[in-house]
Image (cartoon, rainbow, N blue to C red):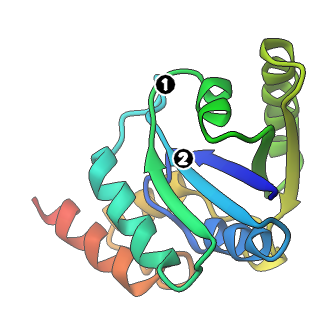
Amino acid sequence: MKTAVYPGTFDPVTLGHIDVIKRASKMFDKIVIGITTHSDKKALFSLEERKSLVEKEVKDLKNVSVETFSGLLVDFVKQKNTKIILRGLRELSDFEFEFQQAVVNRKLDSDIDTVFIMTDARYFYVSSSMVKEIALLGGNIEKFVSKGVQTALKRKLAK
């Protein structure tokens, strides 16, 4: 059984993330979405809120599960009994960062490989940071996130 771990902060989950997850779910027997924190980013949503939002988005994908984790990604990947990290790519600048991360992960565990999936061209420009900024400024985010995420963002930003 081929399992892949798709890690990220997903703050919030975007249509680009969902595109990668849906396409990967057809390539692998199982996808584990690993939601974590990032030391350089202050999250808008808590880990549990992000987990709940992602779970709602993937509820119809029977081979996809959602978990939270802390610590090294390679340790989480090993806990899931796999050697595959899944990453989505939007643009060339993503590749530079993701390539570096993949090399570091291989240095930490030479058995772990990273598989990259290009997001659909409709989502090349979509990032969670951009979505939060547009929402904060009162802009329309319906082309970037689901209705459920739109509602959650509006509630969160109204506080």
SS for callout 1:
loop
Residue 141 location (% of width, % of height): 46, 77
Instruction: Say which quarter of the image contains residue 80.
Output: top right
Q: Nearer the viewer, residue 97 or 112?
A: 112
Tell me the residue that label 1 is attached to. 40
Relative to 34, is 82 on the left or the right? Answer: right
* Three-letter residue code for mark 1: Asp
Residue 152 location (% of width, % of height): 27, 71
Q: Residue furthest left?
A: 159
- Residue located 45% across and 50% down the image: 67
Give the number of the disc on residue 34: 2
**Residue 9 in the image: above or below residue 71:** below
SS for callout 2:
strand
- Report how far apart the C-alphas of labels 1 and 2 lie in the structure: 18 Å
Residue 112 location (% of width, % of height): 84, 31
- Residue located 61% across and 45% down the image: 7
- Residue located 39% across and 86% down the image: 147
Give the number of the disc on residue 66: none
